[in-house]
């Protein structure tokens, strides 16, 4: 097994599709800009499977849409076979996460309209429809409506539709995340079988995923992204021979390696320094019950757990598991050496306490964070111990202009409510001390 | 041996199918021929000019009158549909035009029909001085103005709420604008459009009596139809004729529902987007018959073949010009041109309006405003009264599957019946009871608008999740607690929709409720509706413009403040989908 990192763009070999130095901003409802991609370069060569891997918020789906020509990037360019593309990228078929089938059309009609839009002659449309429907194993379901199909079947239709136009590159946006695990396993193997013949399309596949095992099974090249804003962290080549076995030691070693890269990026092993008067840190988007649940889990498992095992066992996306862990770490209930999660003394005390005591400890820990200190201070200064919520939103925007302030505010309110630190009245839109 | 049996079996099956569907095909064919004949005679009716129409009050004359009114309603509906598709599409696709088109639609929606009527009638009659076309067109346009707006809003909102991934799929697979419309946008909008079409058709009948027997100054612009039949019967105080007219109207609504709307609703089921729970799909016997008919099958197959051939040609054409930026430039230019025309028309209209209003003395506005206050009070009172009885009744019906099965169609029919046709009978009763029109007009408004509240509450009650109801039962909540803590909050969002429609309808109804002709004498009370009616009858355009303007302004203001606040409250506090 060779594992090496290299530049995302290799100018020496011929590329099919390429994004150069792309940055992208979303305009928030309040008019401010949120940067989702920062100087990203990605290239897809013939006959390879490329995966974009990253936690939520790394802009991986946005990269896919920019490469397909669905979104114009704020900065940077897209090329197809060396020529700059301004509209839709030619030779691309997309498989969508939520299938994007037309519910009022049968299986056949869903494929048929795509071929008609492509301008295929009538006599060929029928044959082509039949052929792709058979290829993906939907023969016998031609007259069924999407609502009559299971999740896996729907995605087969999504794949059939994409294949029908004979695309050079198949784009797949988290194709199996709305499909049950067992079905997904089968579909992955089938997609690889469809791609494998070198003399027929699709020549290459670009897939977006948050599932490390899936990526190790399918991809030749894995582009690891960081979040907020999305950047290319590193590119990992995967030269494991095909057909691959997910349970082989080589596969597992690569999975571990990718785990390490991601945890290293998202949770650097810095000593949990006391950020008492430090900068305001963004709160991970989590619910308090999830943090409490994590602590209970650790306590029941001897006070230590592996991040990815826990994610798999509790059926969480690892990106979200990471957010929960990060939240617990901010409150100093856990420590995270490498990819382990260890309960701290404070965490242990919290788990053993009764409900009232838990709330008290939680409140104590909250007040060690700058954001809660500031808001609490603001509230105590007021004569009526209350303040309009917009003032606090503004505080968040100024401290963290790149974050989605509404989500941040929601998370803050949830955390504060759990610790009885302050209350939020939705109708009046204001915060007040209990 | 087995082969012969198979052939024999096929033959019997075919004969059986033919025998079962044969008479239906025959009926269908007869109906079709009848419709063609009817429309031909209608065209003759339009071409000639009869200075005064004499309405025959014998019941045997009614079917022809019903046919005339029905065809006006249907032609108006086709116009509304055409208007909806273009206006809604334009507003959804052109961000610049949208900023003008949407508020304009909001204003148009709040102008009562009678506000347009006199000028449209005069203009069209002067364009076609030698035939009935002008007057017929005017009447159709009036019905149209009671139908079009909510359909347009619905279509626009559907276009704007198509899921993102479905548009993205259409983009990557390179659907052109026509394919996008045909395969994605129209199917997505169909269900909303069908429901609003039913509402619109019902709304269009509301002013039938006025639009068919319009009197301006000393000129009589009467047209033959069920509306004019009724108005003549009222003028003569002929109660049996009135009852015949009401019966004919009810029959017409029921037949339309069974032969047109119900089949369309069932057909539209195929465009629903939600998955799972196939909750009580509507059924229609007529639709089932149509699907079984050989004739219909033959027609649809031929149409499909012709359609395919046409599309083939279209495809060859796009293959030649596909990807050319010139088509985008063309549509941009067209949109811009239309926008300029629209702005021009708006400026011209505003100027004409200003010109009219200038003729009024400032002190003449005072009585109009005072009248507006009276009508506002009546509108609110009638909405409150409607709520008072419709909420308990709606809950009782909606919470019981048996009652809702019986009453829902009845309520729908009642809601589509044009209430003004009942006014004369109610006024007779009110007079006998000694109630003045000042109070009586509230009853008249209520007559038309209470149904909107009722059927929205029924819908809300039926949508209340059963687990919430079971929870209330298992914790032994008494009726009072259940009503205030569960049912009222649960139906509140629906109630708001009911209020908005009911109040809008009440404003409209004030025009006919505050100024009534009965047995040749005019009953009236102080109110904005009476002001409008009187001004229209006297062809007093400055007064008409001023009172219509005040009414539109109050309605828009009300929508923008009170009702919007209610909607927000419903969405934030009482939404069950969050």
Image (cartoon, coloured by chain):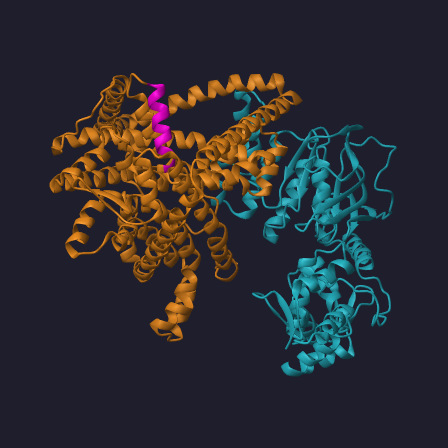
Chain colours: A cyan, B orange
Q: Is residue B397 above or below residue B191?
A: below
Counting from the top left corner in percent of width and height, residue A415 is at: 67, 70
Quarter occupied by the N terminus of chain B: top left
Q: How many marks?
A: 0
Residue B528 visible (yes or no): yes
Q: Quadrant of residue B254?
A: top left
Foreground residue, B513 or A199?
B513
Foreground residue, B161 or B545?
B545
Q: Is residue B408 above or below residue A83?
A: below
- Residue B118 colored in magenta in the image: yes
Query: As drawn, is B256 to the left or to the right of B493?
Result: left
- Residue A129 colored in magenta in the image: no
Q: Give, as a single range, the part of the protein colored magenta.
A: B115-128
Query: As drawn, is A299 to the left or to the right of B142?
Result: right
Counting from the top left corner in percent of width and height, residue A229 is at: 77, 51
Counting from the top left corner in percent of width and height, residue A136 is at: 58, 37
Q: Quadrant of residue B120?
A: top left
Counting from the top left corner in percent of width and height, residue A27 is at: 70, 46
Residue at (78%, 57%) from the top-left corner?
A259
Foreground residue, A371 or A45?
A371
Q: Is residue A187 above or below residue B117?
A: below
Residue at (63%, 50%) from the top-left corner?
A177
């Amino acid at each position: 097994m060779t594992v090496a990192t290299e530049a995302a763009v290799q100018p020496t070999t011929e590329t099919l599709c390429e994004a150069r130095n792309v940055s992208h901003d979303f305009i928030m409802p309040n008019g401010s800009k949120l940067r989702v991609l920062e100087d990203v370069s990605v290239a897809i060569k013939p006959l390879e499977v490329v995966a974009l891997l990253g936690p939520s918020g790394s802009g991986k789906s946005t990269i896919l849409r920019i490469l397909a020509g669905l979104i114009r990037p704020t900065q940077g360019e897209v090329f197809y076979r060396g020529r700059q593309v301004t509209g839709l990228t030619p030779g691309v078929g997309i498989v969508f996460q939520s299938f994007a089938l037309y519910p009022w059309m049968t299986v056949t009609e869903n494929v048929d309209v795509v071929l008609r839009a492509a301008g295929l002659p009538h006599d060929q449309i029928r044959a082509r429809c039949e052929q792709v429907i058979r290829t993906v194993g939907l023969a016998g379901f031609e007259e069924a409506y999407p609502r009559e199909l299971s999740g896996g079947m729907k995605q087969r239709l999504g794949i059939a539709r994409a294949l029908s136009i004979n695309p050079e590159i198949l784009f797949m946006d988290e194709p199996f995340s709305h499909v049950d695990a067992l079905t997904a396993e089968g579909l992955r193997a089938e997609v690889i079988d469809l791609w494998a013949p070198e003399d027929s399309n699709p020549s290459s596949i670009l897939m977006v995923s948050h599932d490390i095992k899936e990526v190790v099974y399918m991809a030749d090249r894995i582009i690891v992204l960081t979040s907020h804003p999305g950047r290319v962290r590193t590119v990992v080549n995967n030269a494991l021979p095909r057909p691959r076995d997910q349970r082989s030691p080589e596969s597992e070693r690569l999975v571990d390696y990718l785990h390490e890269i991601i945890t290293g990026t998202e949770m650097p092993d810095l000593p949990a320094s006391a950020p008492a008067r430090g900068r305001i840190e963004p709160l991970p988007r989590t619910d308090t019950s999830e943090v409490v649940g994590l602590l209970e889990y650790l306590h029941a498992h001897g006070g230590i757990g592996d991040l990815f095992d826990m994610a798999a066992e509790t059926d969480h996306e690892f990106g979200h598991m990471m957010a929960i862990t990060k939240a617990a770490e901010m409150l100093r209930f856990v420590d995270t050496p490498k990819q382990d999660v260890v309960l701290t003394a404070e965490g242990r005390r919290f788990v053993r306490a009764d409900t009232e005591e838990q709330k008290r400890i939680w409140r104590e820990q909250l007040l060690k964070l700058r954001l809660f200190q500031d808001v609490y201070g603001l509230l105590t200064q007021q004569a009526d111990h209350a303040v309009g919520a917009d003032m606090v939103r503004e505080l968040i925007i100024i401290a963290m202009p790149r974050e989605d302030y509404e989500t941040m505010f929601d998370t803050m309110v949830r955390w504060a409510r759990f610790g009885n630190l302050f209350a939020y009245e939705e109708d009046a839109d204001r915060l007040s001390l209990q | 041996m087995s082969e012969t049996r198979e052939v024999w079996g096929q033959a019997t099956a075919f004969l059986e199918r033919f025998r079962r569907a044969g008479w239906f095909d025959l009926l269908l064919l007869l109906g079709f021929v009848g419709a063609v004949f009817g429309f031909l005679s209608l065209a003759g009716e339009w071409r000639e000019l009869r200075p005064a129409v004499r309405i025959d009050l014998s019941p045997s004359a009614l079917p022809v009158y019903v046919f005339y009114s029905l065809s006006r309603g249907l032609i108006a509906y086709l116009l509304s549909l055409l208007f909806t598709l273009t206006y809604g599409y334009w507003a959804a696709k052109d961000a610049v035009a949208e900023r003008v088109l949407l508020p304009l639609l909001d204003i148009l929606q709040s102008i009562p029909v009678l506000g347009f009527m006199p000028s449209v009638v005069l203009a069209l009659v002067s364009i076609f001085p030698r035939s009935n076309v002008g007057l017929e067109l005017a009447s159709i346009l009036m019905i149209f103005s009671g139908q079009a707006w909510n359909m347009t809003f619905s279509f626009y909102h559907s276009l704007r709420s198509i899921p993102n991934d479905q548009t993205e799929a259409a983009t990557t697979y390179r659907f052109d604008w026509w394919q996008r419309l045909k395969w994605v946008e129209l199917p997505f909008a169909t269900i909303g459009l069908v429901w609003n079409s039913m509402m619109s058709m019902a709304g269009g009948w509301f002013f039938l009596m006025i639009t068919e027997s319009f009197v301006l100054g000393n000129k009589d612009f009467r047209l033959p139809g069920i509306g004019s039949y009724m108005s003549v019967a009222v003028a003569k105080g002929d109660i049996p004729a009135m009852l015949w007219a009401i019966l004919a109207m009810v029959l017409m609504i029921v037949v339309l529902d069974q032969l047109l709307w119900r089949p369309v609703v069932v057909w539209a089921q195929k465009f629903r987007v939600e998955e799972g729970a196939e909750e009580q799909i509507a059924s229609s016997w007529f639709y089932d018959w149509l699907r079984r008919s050989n004739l219909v099958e033959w027609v649809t197959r031929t149409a499909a073949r012709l359609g395919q051939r046409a599309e083939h040609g279209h495809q060859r054409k796009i293959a030649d010009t596909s990807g050319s930026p010139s088509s985008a430039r063309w549509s941009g230019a067209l949109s811009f041109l239309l926008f300029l025309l629209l702005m021009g028309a708006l400026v011209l209209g505003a100027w004409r309006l200003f010109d009219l209003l200038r003729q009024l003395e400032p002190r003449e506005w005072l009585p109009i405003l005072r009248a507006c206050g009276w009508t506002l009070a009546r509108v609110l009172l009638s909405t409150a009264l409607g709520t008072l009885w419709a909420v308990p009744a709606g809950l009782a019906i909606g919470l019981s599957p048996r009652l809702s099965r019986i009453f829902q169609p009845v309520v729908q029919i009642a809601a589509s019946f044009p209430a003004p046709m009942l006014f004369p009978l109610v006024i007779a009763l009110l007079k006998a009871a000694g109630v003045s029109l000042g109070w009586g007009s509230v009853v008249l408004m209520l007559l038309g608008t209470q149904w909107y509240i009722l059927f929205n509450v029924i819908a809300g009650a039926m949508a209340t999740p059963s687990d919430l109801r079971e929870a209330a039962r298992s914790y032994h909540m008494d009726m009072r607690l259940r009503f205030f803590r569960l049912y009222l909050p649960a139906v509140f969002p629906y109630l708001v929709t009911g209020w908005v429609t009911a109040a809008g309808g009440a404003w409209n109804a004030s025009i006919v409720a505050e100024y009534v002709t009965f047995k040749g004498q005019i009953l009236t009370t102080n109110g904005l509706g009476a002001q409008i009616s009187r001004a229209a009858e006297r062809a007093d355009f400055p007064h008409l413009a001023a009172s219509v303007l005040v009414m539109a302004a109050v309605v828009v203001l009300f929508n923008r403040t009170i009702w919007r606040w209610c909607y927000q409250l419903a969405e934030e506090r009482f939404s069950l989908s969050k």
